[in-house]
Amino acid sequence: MKCPFCRQSNNHVIDSRLGKDEEMIRRRRECIACSRRFTTYERVEEAMPMVVKKDGRREAFDRLKITNGLKRACQKRPVSMDAIESIADRIERGIQERGEKEIPGSIIGEAAMRELHDTDPVAYVRFASVYRSFKDLDEFMTELEDLLNERTHRTAAKPPKKTANARKKRRKPLPAEGTQP
Ligand SMILES: [Zn+2]
């Protein structure tokens, strides 16, 4: 994002808000070189920063990944889907408001930890204990899934009760590991 006055690309966001239709985000920016201010309008989906992974690779921000991580941490805990979606909303909004092009993946994990800390102690401990040793959301998700699967297999023969939401999504049999539906 270059300054329209001096063409320098260093600027910081001084205000950031969603437009009335919630599809555009309006940002007031101040140029670090010349201190002049200008406004940008960005489409919300494009306003999400790229996530820098531990190994340096970049990937698009993926809200579903966050929601899935939260759901897994909250498995069999008294945390509603509404509460999980609200947590994901706050994390997403918080990231958006930083107004940066790239963010380290650890910021997402830490935001999720803070939210879970205030939501459910067991979900928090599950998330935190696994997350702290990985610092990478992908690796973390795999590990957390293994951990929960182990526990489920040990304690219950029948599959966990499905929510209406899960039923809707999983009418078809799940595809094999590693493939996209
Ligand atoms: Zn400038």
Image (cartoon, rainbow, N blue to C red):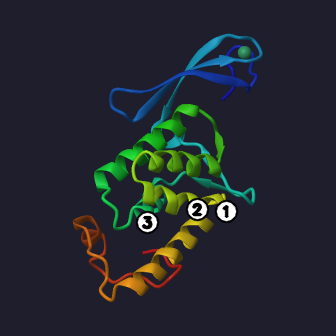
Identify the residue shown where x is 38% and y is 84%.
Answer: 155
| Pointer 1 residue Cβ closer than 8 Å to ligand 1 | no
The answer to whether residue 154 is above or below residue 100 is below
Quarter of the view holding residue 31: top right
Query: Does 129 sit above or below residue 93?
Result: below
Q: Amino acid at mark 2?
A: Ser
Quadrant of the snapshot with the N terminus: top right
From the image, tell me which residue sits under label 1.
133
- Say whether mark 2 is within 8 Å of ligand 1: no
The residue to which callout 3 is attached is 72
**Cα gap from disc 3 to disc 1, whole angstroms:** 17 Å
Q: Residues within 10 Å of mark 3 (few under 14, many from 20)?
A: some
The residue carrying mark 2 is 129
Q: Amino acid at mark 3?
A: Arg
Q: Count the marks: how many? A: 3
- Distance from label 1 to label 2 (Cα)? 7 Å
Q: Is residue 21 left or right of residue 35?
A: left
Quadrant in which the C terminus appears:
bottom left
Q: Are marks 1 and 2 in contact (CB under 8 Å)?
A: yes
Residue 141 relative to residue 156: left or right: right
Circles 3 and 1, Cβ within 8 Å, touching? The answer is no
The crowding category of the residue bearing disc 2, from other C-alpha atoms within 10 Å (few below 14, some 14 to 19, many at least 20), is few
Distance between the alpha carbons at the discs numbered 2 and 3: 13 Å
